[in-house]
Image (tube, grey):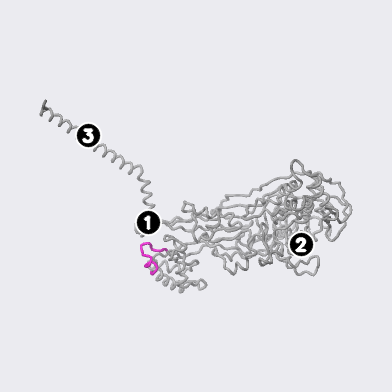
């Protein structure tokens, strides 16, 4: 059957109409989607995309922050920042490298003319110097990093460049911060120094982490000076501040096409230390004077010909504040000016750059000579004896009423192979108790009544006798970090475990009982002395009284912190205090305050000879302890001769400036808050009987 043409036509028209309607519907839908998407772009995503577009078409130059200052406890500047104007050069990215180098050489010649005519002759540069600073081979910087050509511009140089800006394309003048240190050299190893960020960013973990910083105001600059030791490093984030920014629009060819916007840098916060400038300087001088005395003395007991270094720490008993920390000899921190040190200065001062009160420092010896001398980390010697008596009493090895007959000699070990422990200079003290053993510094008492008895008793509660001894050491801060937070602080060196394994536990404990089985830092000994003074509270050593922001607002105050506490019966404390009140200590003649002390002469075998190290701990006043002091003089001989006189001068300095009884006796008044400032003294001596004490020395 044939199709009806008329019907087929009708069907075709219907199909065409359907396809046409479908086409218009699809077209309408597509246009609708497009319109909606455009609306979203304009009204929803528009602001974000606009911001991204602006960001991609702008460039920012970071302005270095001004570093916060470091003051002593009275507001005297120790480390401070001053502003300087520096000239920077930016490579023009639209030029080919060959053209850029040629233009830079022409620019260097023009800069030299200005520097020569208007600059400081002491900061003269050559064309080669200028080209080297331009870094045209990109050895130190990428193409977008401005290169610092010269710092410390004179007013005349600045004026010339500002008036002739159009003649110096790619040249910009920026304000920068320069670090200065007191010429008095106040606690230089504690304060630390600065180095260039670019030189330490890959070697110091702290700065390596800064390379991932995304906030432009916190990103470090290549030529920025950053803390590398001491408090400068410990408080780097506090002192640094934030970058400023110079932001300007550029086109696709990186050419500036609009006005520049400036965000000013934020100055870092200021730190006010617990260190008292005058006490610190008198401490430093006391050490240097004593080194001169003992190395030239004709007194055979005082003479210490090998002594080259001395270390001292003064710590407030109840607060943990460090008022003086001296590692001597020291140096002028300004040798690090500009974040670099010359090879000559490094050669001269490398042996004193580190803080010997917290880590190993030797005298000015060659590498070969160092094996012939002790370092700053020393055995405590007889300064251990007050703690030995406390351990003996607390472990019930003897009582406060127990009497020991000191015959000047104690022996232990297999018959025929005995080891003998003797008193210094062969003294025999007869019948003595624990207090008298401290007073006379009896080695046989400590060996017999403490070390040997602890060994003979054996293990208790699953702990060996050596582990029990170690527990006491750590509770008193010996063999553990002090909690100061100072970078590179050492825990000291524990030797009694090694001696127990290679020799015997008996030998380890006997030798440890009179201070010969561990080596500790001066800061650890000061913390230990303060713990004896406050009867068992181990205070965290702290160096910062308060931190203030750039507007002078206090953002952090001071809070004493107890790290741990040891509780003993009061009669145990009384026993050691009685002994410490009667120890002979040179240099304390005529003092008008009470004090308790312990001298020490620790021995070390160094390349065929026995080095005698002077050690001394003390605290004052005796009835209400305010200040604890530890002094260490490697190769310094007897503690009473080599170290004790230094401590006397530290106590006197603190008494004058702060007051052992709460009132400064003769305080130095600084005329201004500036480095190297001299001052006058004000006599605040009172005749009140509470401020006068009896001299307790028994020399």
Residue extent of the magenta highlight: 90-102
Q: Which residue is mark 3?
A: 22
> 678 left or right of 36?
right
Q: CA distance from mark 1 to mark 3?
A: 50 Å
Q: CA distance from mark 2 to mark 3?
A: 106 Å
Of the pair 408 and 269, the residue shown nearer to us = 408
**Place of residue 617 in the rendered image (x, y in percent of width and height, measured from the top left):** 75, 56
Is residue 9 shown above or below 680? above
Q: CA distance from mark 1 to mark 2?
A: 71 Å
Of the pair 463 and 560, the residue shown nearer to us = 463
Task: Residue 485: say if magenta.
Answer: no
Q: Quadrant where the N terminus lies? A: top left
Q: Which residue is mark 1?
A: 249
**Place of residue 428 in the rendered image (x, y in percent of width and height, measured from the top left):** 88, 57
Secondary-structure class at tag 3: helix
Ranked by sequence position, the earlier of labels 1 and 2 is 1
> 431 left or right of 521?
right
Mark whose residue sits in front, 1 or 3: 3
Ranked by sequence position, the earlier of labels 2 and 3 is 3
Numbered tag placed on residue 612 in the rendering: 2
Of the pair 466 and 275, the residue shown nearer to us = 466
**Place of residue 437 in the rendered image (x, y in percent of width and height, measured from the top left):** 83, 53
Report if the CB atoms under discs 1 and 3 are less than 8 Å apart.
no
Ranked by sequence position, the earlier of labels 1 and 3 is 3
């Amino acid at each position: 059957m044939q199709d009806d043409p008329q019907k087929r036509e009708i069907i075709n028209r219907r199909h065409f109409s359907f396809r046409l309607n479908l086409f218009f519907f699809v077209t309408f839908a597509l246009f609708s989607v497009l319109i909606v998407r455009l609306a979203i772009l304009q009204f929803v995503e528009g602001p974000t995309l606009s911001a991204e577009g602006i960001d991609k078409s702008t460039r920012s130059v970071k302005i270095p922050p001004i570093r916060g200052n470091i003051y002593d406890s009275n507001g005297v500047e120790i480390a401070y920042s001053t502003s300087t104007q520096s000239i920077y050069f930016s490579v023009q990215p639209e030029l080919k490298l060959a053209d850029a180098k040629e233009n830079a050489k022409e620019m260097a010649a023009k800069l030299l003319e200005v520097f020569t005519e208007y600059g400081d002759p002491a900061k003269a540069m050559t064309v080669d110097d200028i080209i080297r600073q331009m870094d045209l081979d990109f050895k130190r910087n990428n193409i977008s990093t401005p290169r610092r050509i010269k710092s410390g511009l004179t007013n005349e140089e600045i004026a010339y460049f500002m008036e002739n800006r159009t003649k110096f394309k790619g040249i910009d003048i920026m304000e920068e911060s320069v670090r200065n240190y007191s010429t008095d050299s106040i606690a230089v190893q504690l304060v630390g120094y600065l180095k260039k960020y670019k030189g330490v960013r890959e070697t110091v973990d702290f700065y390596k982490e800064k390379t991932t910083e995304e906030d432009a105001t916190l990103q470090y600059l290549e030529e920025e000076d950053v803390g590398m030791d001491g408090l400068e490093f410990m408080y780097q984030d506090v002192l640094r501040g934030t970058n400023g920014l110079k932001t300007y629009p550029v086109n696709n060819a990186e050419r500036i096409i609009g006005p520049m916007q400036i965000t000013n840098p934020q100055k870092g916060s200021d730190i006010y230390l617990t260190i008292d400038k005058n006490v610190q300087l008198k401490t430093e001088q006391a050490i240097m004077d004593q080194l001169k005395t003992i190395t030239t003395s004709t007194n055979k007991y005082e003479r210490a010909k090998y002594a080259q270094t001395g270390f001292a720490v003064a710590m407030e008993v109840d607060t943990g504040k460090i008022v003086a920390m001296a590692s001597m000899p020291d140096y002028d921190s300004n040798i690090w000016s500009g974040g670099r040190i010359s090879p000559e200065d490094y050669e001269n001062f490398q042996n004193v750059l580190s803080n010997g009160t917290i880590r190993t420092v030797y005298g000015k010896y060659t590498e070969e000579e160092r094996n012939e001398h002790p370092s700053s980390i020393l055995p405590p010697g007889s300064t251990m004896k007050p703690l030995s008596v406390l351990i003996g009493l607390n472990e019930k090895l003897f009582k406060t009423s127990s009497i020991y007959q000191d015959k000047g000699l104690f022996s232990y070990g297999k018959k025929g192979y005995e080891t003998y422990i003797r008193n210094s200079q062969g003294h025999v003290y007869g019948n003595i108790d624990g207090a008298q053993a401290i007073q006379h510094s009896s080695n046989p008492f400590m060996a017999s009544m403490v070390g040997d008895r602890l060994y003979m008793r054996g293990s208790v509660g699953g702990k060996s006798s050596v582990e029990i001894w170690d527990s006491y050491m750590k509770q008193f801060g010996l063999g553990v970090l002090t909690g100061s937070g100072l970078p590179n602080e050492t825990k000291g060196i524990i030797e009694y475990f090694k001696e127990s394994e290679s020799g015997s536990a008996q030998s380890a404990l006997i030798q440890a009982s009179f201070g010969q089985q561990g080596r500790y830092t001066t800061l650890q000994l000061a913390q230990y002395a303060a713990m004896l003074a406050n009867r068992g509270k181990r205070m965290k050593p702290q160096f910062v009284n308060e931190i203030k922001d750039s507007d002078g607002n206090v953002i952090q105050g001071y809070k004493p912190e107890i790290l741990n506490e040891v509780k003993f019966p009061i009669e145990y404390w009384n026993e050691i205090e009685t002994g410490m009140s009667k120890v002979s200590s040179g240099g304390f003649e005529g003092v008008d305050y009470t004090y308790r002390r312990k001298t020490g002469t620790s021995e070390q075998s160094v390349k065929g000879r026995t080095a005698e190290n002077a050690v001394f701990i003390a605290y004052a006043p005796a009835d209400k302890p305010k200040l604890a002091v530890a002094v260490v003089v490697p190769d310094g001989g007897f503690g009473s001769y080599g170290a004790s006189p230094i401590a006397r001068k530290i106590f006197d300095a603190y008494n004058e400036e702060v007051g052992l009884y709460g009132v400064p006796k003769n305080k130095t008044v600084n005329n201004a808050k500036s480095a190297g400032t001299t001052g006058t003294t004000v006599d605040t001596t009172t005749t009140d009987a509470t401020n006068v004490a009896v001299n307790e020395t028994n020399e």
